[in-house]
């Protein structure tokens, strides 16, 4: 059995990955929160204490400053020593990806999820804590997740980072 690791930026992405694993929509694996664009992985970090077949890193593109890209590069090099690294680029942030996956506007997300006050803060809290994604997301939706990395690819083209479109799907 292969060992996989998901590295996500926050609670919202972690909840999404955990939900998708339970639905058998993505490969099984451990999921940890660590922002690989803002924090450098240290040799003492528990992330690098084991080896993995595949390491799936999910990043936002709302922080694209040079120091963020340099941090990303350093972390990818570190992760390559413990497994095959695949970067999934969210276009801006998770809420934008979710709108794209479900083919609806941000406003329609509030309605779809019955977000009471229709604020971004309430949406984020709901996505991090309460949502059961299987009620809303089907296998066909997942194919759209992280499928628009073109702008980010152009930004990092000189840095020799490999980005694969879309999240890996489980072959049944």
Image: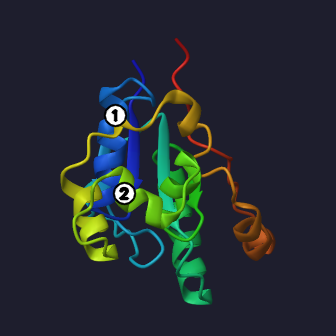
The numbered dot on residue 111 is: 2
Element assignment for label 2: helix
Furthest toward the left, the residue is: 129
In front of the other: 54 or 31: 31
In front of the other: 9 or 115: 115
User: Where residue 45 appears, x then y in whole percent?
Assistant: 27, 63
Characterize the local packing of mark 2: few (<14), some (14-19) or many (20 or more) Cα atoms within 10 angstroms: few
When asked about the image quadrant of residue 137, the answer is top left
From the viewer's perspective, is 73 left or right of 155?
Answer: left
User: Where residue 123 appears, x then y in whole percent?
Assistant: 30, 65
From the viewer's perspective, is 1 left or right of 139?
Answer: left
Q: Residue at x 54, y 62 (%)?
A: 105
User: Of label 1 and label 2, which has the lower sequence position?
Assistant: 2
Q: Residue at x 46, y 59 (%)?
A: 108
Element assignment for label 1: helix
User: Where residue 151 appears, x then y in whole percent?
Assistant: 75, 70
Q: Residue at x 70, y 69 (%)?
A: 152
User: Where residue 84 appears, x then y in whole percent?
Assistant: 56, 42
Q: Residue at x 53, y 81 (%)?
A: 63
Residue 29 appears in the figure: no
Furthest toward the top, the residue is: 172
From the viewer's perspective, is 49 left or right of 81?
Answer: left
Residue of label 1: 135
């Amino acid at each position: 059995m292969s060992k996989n690791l998901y590295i996500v930026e926050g609670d919202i992405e972690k909840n999404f990955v955990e939900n998708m694993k339970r639905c058998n929509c993505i490969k099984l694996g451990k999921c940890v929160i660590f922002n690989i664009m803002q924090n450098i992985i240290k040799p003492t970090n528990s992330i690098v204490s084991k080896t993995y077949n595949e390491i799936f890193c999910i990043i936002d593109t709302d922080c694209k400053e040079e120091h963020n890209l340099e941090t990303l590069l350093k972390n990818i090099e570190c992760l390559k020593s413990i497994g095959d690294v695949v970067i999934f680029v969210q276009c801006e942030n998770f809420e934008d990806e979710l709108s794209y996956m479900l083919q609806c506007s941000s406003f329609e997300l509030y309605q779809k999820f019955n977000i009471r006050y229709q604020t971004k803060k309430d949406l984020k809290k709901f996505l991090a804590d309460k949502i059961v994604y299987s009620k809303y997301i089907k296998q066909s939706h997942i194919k759209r997740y992280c499928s628009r990395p073109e702008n980010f690819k152009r930004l990092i083209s000189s840095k020799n980072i490999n980005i694969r479109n879309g999240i890996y799907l489980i072959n049944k």
